[in-house]
Amino acid sequence: MADLDGGPEEPKLLTRARRVWLARGLVLVVGAFAAGFIGWSALADDGGEPPAATPRPAVTAAPARAAATDEDQALRRAVGQKIITRMAGLQPSRRLLGRVYRGEVGGVILFAHNARAPAQVVEAVAALQEAAVRGGHPRLLIAVDQEGGTVRRLPWAPPLASAAALGADPAGALGEGERTGRALRLAGVNFDLAPVLDVPASGASFLGTRAFGRTAEAVSRAGCAFAAGLRRGGVFTSGKHFPGLGYATANTDHARVVIRAAAPWLRAAYRPYRECRNVLDTVMVSNAAYPGLGVRVPAVFSRAVIEGELRGRVGFRGVVVSDSLQAGAVRHVPGAAVKAARAGVDLLVYPTSERASEAAYRALLSAGRSHPAWRTRLMESARRIRTLKTR
C-alpha cells in the first residue's frame, strides 16, 4: 500500500520470488480497486452517492436519508389536504395552480365573484382539478355556500327558496336538495357548505331565514331531508355551525361572539346533528365561544367541543371543517391554523386571502416537523379527508 500512497520505493535488489509475489499482490489490489470503481459507477448512474470510507455507513446512510425524505414528503401532502383556500377572479392564477400541483391545497372555496356563468366555472374547476391530478394528488374539494335564499354563491343554481321556506315542507326540501346537488355537480362543484342546523332560540337570532325552523325537531326534519337530497345530487354536505348559533344575536363573520347559554340548553340543540349523522359528510364548527360548556376560546380552537361534544356526545365520525379562519371572531388569534388543527379540525377554511392559506400551510408543516406526536395526528386527519374524497 505504500507504493499506491506515494511512499518510499522498494530497493532494486529484489529476489525473483519476491518479484513474483509482489506482481500477484498488485493484481489483487488492482482487481479490488476495479471492482470498487465499477460499484461506485453503478451508484453514480442510479443517482446515488459514492460510498463512505467505511463500508457500514455506506449501506445504511442512503436508505435513512431516503426514508427521511419520504416521511417529509408524506407530511407535506397531509398538510396540504387540510387547506381550503379562496380563488381570486374568474380563473385560477398560475400561483394557485402551482400550489395545487405541489399538493399544498386540498380544496378551493368559490364565491359569487368567481362565478359569472356555468361554463366559466366549469373551465376554472377543470384547470384546478387537472393541476391536482397531474401532481399525483387526490382531486380537490370545490366548495360553495349554497344554502338557498340570499345565501347562494352560484346565482343561477337552486335553491331559490330559503331554508325557512323549505322547512315547512320536508319532502320539498329533499327534492330541492337533490336539484341543488345536481346543479352544483354540473358546474364542477362537489361540496356544499350546507345545511344550517342551528336552532334559533328566539326572534333575536341573527340567523333569520337561514334556519329551517324554530325547534330542534323542525330543523332536524327539514335539514336532514335537504342534506339527503344534496347527497343524491352528488355533492358532499356540511352541517353547521356546531355547537350552534341559535343564541347568537351577532354574526361571527363580523365580531367576537360569546354564547352564554347553559350546557343543557346548548346540548338540546344537538338533535339535528345527531339525527342527520348519516347524511352529513362534514360538520362545520362555530367561531363563537361557549363558556357554558367550559370553553372560553372559540369552539373552533377547543378540543373539548370537537372531541368531547361533537365526536363524544353526538357520535359524529366524519370530517370536521372550520368556519372562516379569517372571520372577525377569530382574526385576532395568533397561530389560528395550528390551534384549530390541534383541537381536531380537519379542513381549515381561508375564504378571503390566498396568502393567509399559504402561511397556514407553512405553520402546520413546521409544527408537524417539530413534534412527532403531532405529526401522527396530522396524518390521521389527512386520511379522513382522503377517505371522504374517495367517496
Image: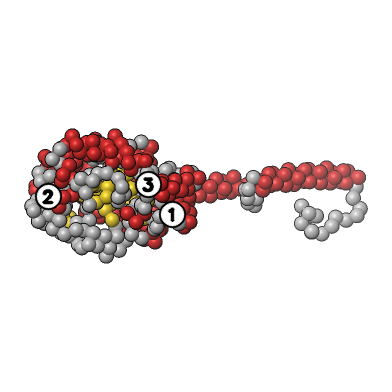
The three-letter amino acid code for the residue at tag 1 is Pro
On the rendered structure, is 15 left or right of 390?
right
Camera-side residue: 61 or 54? 61
Q: Earlier in the sequence, mark 3 or mark 2?
A: 3
Rendering coords of residue 81 (x, y %): 39, 48
The three-letter amino acid code for the residue at tag 2 is Pro
Please give the residue where the numbered disc 2 appears in the rendered image.
200
Gap between marks 3 and 2 measured at Cα: 34 Å
User: Looking at the image, is mark 3 or mark 2 nearer the viewer?
Assistant: 3
Gap between marks 2 and 1 measured at Cα: 38 Å
Badge 1 marks a residue whose secondary structure is loop
Q: Earlier in the sequence, mark 2 or mark 1?
A: 1
On the rendered structure, is 93 left or right of 204?
right
Callout 2–callout 1 Cβ contact below 8 Å: no
Which quadrant of the figure has residue 381? top left
Say few, some or many: other residues with alpha carbon within 10 Å of mark 3 (under 14 / 14 to 19 / 20 or more): some
Res. 207 in view = yes
Rendering coords of residue 189 (x, y %): 35, 44
Gap between marks 1 and 3 measured at Cα: 15 Å
Please give the residue where the numbered disc 1 appears in the rendered image.
92
Residue at position x 55%, y 45% in the image: 63
The three-letter amino acid code for the residue at tag 3 is Pro
Res. 341 in view = no
Q: Earlier in the sequence, mark 1 or mark 3?
A: 1
Could you say which disc has been placed on residue 379 in the image? none
Could you say which disc has been placed on residue 118 in the image? 3
What coloring was used for the rendering?
A: secondary structure
Camera-side residue: 71 or 390? 390
Rendering coords of residue 12 (x, y %): 91, 54
Badge 2 marks a residue whose secondary structure is loop
On the rendered structure, is 226 left or right of 132?
left
